[in-house]
Image (cartoon, rainbow, N blue to C red):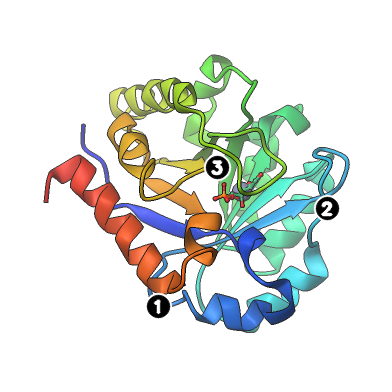
Amino acid sequence: MTVPPPIVAPSILAADFARLADEVRAVEDAADWLHVDVMDNHFVPNLTIGLPVVQSLRGATTIPFDVHLMIEDPRRWAPGYADAGAYNVTFHAEACDDPVALAKDLRSAGAKAGLAIDRDTPIESYLELLPSFDTLLIMTIKAGFGGQRFIPHLLDKVRAARRHVETGHLDVRIEVDGGITADTIAQAAEAGADAFVAGTAVYGADDPAEAVRKLRARAEHAVTGA
Ligand code: DX5
Ligand code: ZN
């Protein structure tokens, strides 16, 4: 298995929203991406932030934004996040009837395109779409809330995706999201994930930047033994 160096993306869902800019700056030197969870109270029951907040936050930091849209009708909203300067915009397969068309729109708007697969969605029929995408986000919980417990058997989807990416020589990051901690990140890395979202494990720590570095070291160690 040849896997690129791991990406660690703290999720702001677990941050203190009253101090959001400070919370982001606390990790910007240690982290690779900032994971921004957008929820609309329709696709998932929870509600977080939308485009105006992401636009203002974009002006407060230089870290690349990994926007995770847990929303209905992503064709209507997703390109706005690319226009706002998001590095990667991920939308859910379950919410979109033409994922390849939306991926093209996102790339034309200057962002990378990500496809997310929720807990109860089989991955097989989506693997053939991967050449149109830059990231594949495999949920390791049911999307909607932070602080849930990691579900190990969902790593079977990561293994299937890694095999597909290797066989097809695809340039696609395989990202896992949900319950990623210092205790679970190694098994996700061994399964073939190379980008790791962590909310509680970063912002629940006394030193969020140190927590990011520790997570990356564990992921690296799991794959290279170094
Ligand atoms: C939940 C979000 C996750 C969440 C992860 O639907 O997509 O990004 O913030 O939080 P933890 O790391 O606490 O599971
Ligand atoms: Zn997320």
Residue 178 is marked as 3
Q: Residue at x 81, y 52 (%)?
A: 77
- In this picture, residue 20 sits left or right of residue 41: left
* Label 2 crowd (10 A; few <14 / some 14-19 / many >=20): some
Q: Amino acid at mark 3?
A: Gly
* Label 3 crowd (10 A; few <14 / some 14-19 / many >=20): many
Residue 95 position by quadrant: top right
Q: Which residue is mark 2?
A: 47
Disc with the residue nearer the chain's start (3 vs 2)? 2
Judging depth in this view, the residue of 34 and 64 nearest the camera is 34
- In this picture, residue 32 sits left or right of residue 65: left
The percent coordinates of residue 174 (x first, y second) are 43, 39
Judging depth in this view, the residue of 207 and 125 nearest the camera is 207
The percent coordinates of residue 158 (x first, y second) are 42, 28
Q: Residue at x 63, y 67 (%)?
A: 15
Q: Amino acid at mark 1?
A: Asp
- The outermost residue toward the left is 226
Q: Amino acid at mark 2?
A: Leu
The image shows residue 135, relative to residue 7, as above or below, that is: above
Residue 29 is marked as 1
The image shows residue 31, relative to residue 61, as above or below, that is: above
Instruction: Find numbered disc 2 in the image and state the secondary structure of the residue it sits on.
Output: loop
The reply to whether the C-beta atoms of the residues labelled 3 and 2 are less than 8 Å apart is no
Residue 125 position by quadrant: top right
Residue 12 is marked as none
Alpha carbon distance from label 2 to label 1:
28 Å
Alpha carbon distance from label 3 to label 2:
17 Å
- In this picture, residue 49 sits left or right of residue 160: right
Q: Disc 3, ligand 1: is the CB inside 8 Å?
A: yes
Mark yes or no: residue 73 visible: yes
If the image is split into quadrants, where does the N terminus sit? top left
The percent coordinates of residue 199 (x first, y second) are 55, 56
